[in-house]
């Protein structure tokens, strides 16, 4: 939960920084104010969307019973395959459970 709040705070700071940079660039001569505004608003919107997602995740955390597991992110990896390997063993979904930054289980 603390990590979600830190990420949210970081994104909010980035939005403020982008707004500051936008105002700064729009005051420069020879710069299209419309293009600057468009570009910066896209970046700000990306971060605000991420903030909304984090807020949703925080709401869901409040609903979950204690001890529940959640998937925060998924990572794909390459697996070495050679002749004679059992495909079912290789293709089964694998999971690495991480708690507080420490790997606690590999399945």
Image (cartoon, helix red, strand yellow):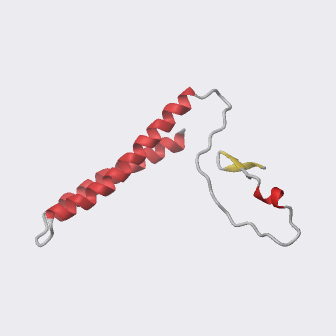
Q: Position of residue 49 (x, y in %)?
A: 38, 46
Residue 53 versus residue 64 in the image, above or below: below
Determine which quarter of the picture holds residue 100: top right
| Residue under the point 66% across and 33% down | 68
Q: Position of residue 52 (x, y in %)?
A: 40, 41
Q: Nearer the viewer, residue 19 or 78?
A: 78
Image-based side of 60 in relation to 78, left or right: left
| Residue under the point 41% across and 50% down | 10
| Residue under the point 63% across and 26% down | 65
Determine which quarter of the picture holds residue 41: bottom left
Q: Position of residue 30 (x, y in %)?
A: 12, 73
Label total for image:
0
Image-based side of 91 in relation to 32, left or right: right
Determine which quarter of the picture holds residue 1: top right
Image-based side of 95 in relation to 21, left or right: right
Q: Nearer the viewer, residue 103 or 47?
A: 47
Q: Nearer the viewer, residue 93 or 33?
A: 93
Q: Position of residue 17 (x, y in %)?
A: 30, 55
User: In the orientation shown, which residue stands out farthest toward the left?
Assistant: 29
| Residue under the point 55% across and 27% down | 63
Image-based side of 1 in relation to 83, left or right: left
């Amino acid at each position: 939960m603390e990590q979600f709040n830190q990420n949210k705070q970081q994104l909010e700071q980035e939005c403020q920084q982008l707004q500051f940079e936008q105002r700064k660039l729009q005051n420069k001569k020879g710069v299209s104010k419309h293009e600057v505004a468009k570009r910066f608003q896209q970046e700000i919107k990306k971060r605000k969307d991420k903030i909304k997602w984090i807020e949703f995740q925080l709401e869901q955390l409040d609903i979950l019973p204690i001890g529940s597991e959640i998937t925060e992110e998924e990572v794909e990896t390459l697996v070495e395959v050679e002749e004679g390997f059992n495909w079912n063993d290789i293709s089964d979904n694998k999971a690495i459970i991480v708690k507080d930054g420490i790997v606690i289980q590999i399945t």
